[in-house]
Amino acid sequence: MQNFNYYNPTRVLFGRGMISKLPRLLTQDQKILVAYGGGSIKQNGVYDQVMSALEGFTVVEFGGIEANPQYQTCMRAVDLVRQEKINFLLSVGGGSVLDAIKFIAAAVHFKGEEPWDILARNAGITSALPLGCVLTLPATGSESNSNAVISRAETGEKLAFSSKHVFPAFAVLDPTTTFSLPERQITNGVVDAFVHVMEQYLTYDVNAPLQDRFAESILQTLIEQGPLAIRTPQDYDVRANIMWAATMALNTLIGQGVPQDWTTHQIGHELTALQGIDHARTLAIIFPAVMKHQRQFKGDKIVRYGRRVWGIIEPERERAIDLTIAKTIEFFRQMGAPTCLADVSLTPQDVWQAVAAHEKRGSRLGEGQRIGPKEIGEILLLAA
Ligand code: NZQ
Ligand code: ZN
């Protein structure tokens, strides 16, 4: 096992009715920005629950944060926060609203010239406004991690940053808030969480059996509960299991002490920036191609995953790898996700700029830094 330094300060309040506990998590001297997205929280009653819990608190609202949150929108919120002297940010919605809030929290305190540098130049963050969230879409794990991903339409970029200063102080996870999710978002959430686990698991063995089994148990839970959420959408326990699995998938616990490979996410972000494809759908398209491309290096782990998660007992190694990749694709399809570029009416040529965009950034991807622009091109061809 590799050395690690694990830190996760987010308090999680989980279960039905937990939104009513918000007053215990806040103090009266806080001036709170309640931020939300395009309006789903007004239709499903979450907005009313939050506002009634916050009665007596000083609240300012900021709505209209888009899916794949935009830099410009965040900067409008930064102005509002400064103008209104807000000192606590509350995200009510999915990963996009929460990521925006994390960026806003950092940007308000940022001393440099252009807050975009937090994303584009890894500019250091020494503090941020405190923040919390009421999560309505289990997917990203953002509710209990220190990452955020922000897009900039005018440059076609979608970039991530991470800072210990933007961990949510608390996350309220009430599975009943997810009953109103359209099927597409249930699919997206399950696939996103699944690939988060995979990118912390599918590398090479470092004799870390606990991390492996944590990861495998989350995968098995998603494989079991994901289709149930589509079939029986009003089942509370199913929603609760998916919500907790998605948090556990990316609260960074399972990735401690093990190598990681975020190739699929890196390429996926380029596809969202270029073509606006939902985040999770890019992952369902790219991840199988990464497995195929890297099978020579990831083979041992693919075989273990196939055996323990899918029950594949095929003794011949290459055949076992093929069967395991096929099972993974079948699961994404069962969930209703596209699994190749053709499924979203694109060709590798349509997304070729992803290679150039990556070349510009100059980093190499994968647990062994084996993946550069040439390999990304090959992966896109495998994803055709
Ligand atoms: O905007 P509203 O009206 O709220 O509608 C949203 C949005 O249209 C809707 N929605 C959310 N909760 C709902 C609901 N509709 C009905 N009922 C509910 N309960 O769902 C749509 C998608 O929401 P969004 O927040 O964009 O989805 P998600 O949570 O999947 O977040 C995706 C973003 O997170 C980033 C992605 O790149 C993408 O920008 N990620 C963040 C990560 C992190 N911070 O650690 C890691 C991930 O890998 C990911 O990259
Ligand atoms: Zn993701």
Image (cartoon, helix red, strand yellow):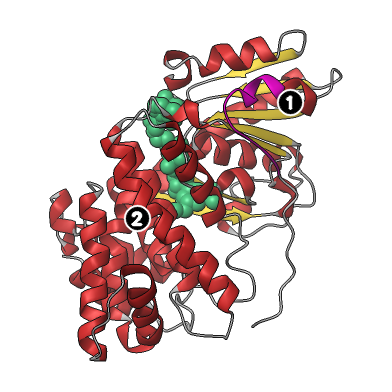
Residue that mark 1 sits on:
82
User: Residue type at mark 2?
Assistant: Ile
Instruction: Classify mark 2: residues with Cα within 10 Å, few (<14), some (14-19) or many (20+).
Output: many
Label placed on residue 223: 2
- Residue nearest the viewer, comparing 330 with 294: 330
User: Residue type at mark 1?
Assistant: Arg
Left or right, 310 with respect to 161, comes to left
Label 2 element class = helix
- Residue 17 magenta-highlighted: yes
Q: Residue at x 69, y 47 (%)?
A: 167
Image position, residue 101 (x, y; %): 61, 36
Does residue 69 appear anywhere in the picture?
Answer: no
Q: Is residue 172 above or below residue 337?
A: above
Q: Quadrant of residue 251?
A: bottom right
Label 1 element class = helix
Image position, residue 9 (x, y; %): 75, 49
Left or right, 105 with respect to 240, comes to right
Q: Residue at x 39, y 86 (%)?
A: 300
Q: Is residue 43 above or below residue 190?
A: above
Q: Which residue is outermost to the bottom?
A: 316
Q: Which residues are magenta?
A: 11-21
Image position, residue 350 (x, y; %): 18, 57
Q: Is residue 109 above or below residue 346?
A: above
Instruction: Classify mark 1: residues with Cα within 10 Å, few (<14), some (14-19) or many (20+).
Output: few
**Disc 1 Cβ-to-ligand 1 distance below 8 Å:** no
Q: Residue at x 72, y 57 (%)?
A: 124
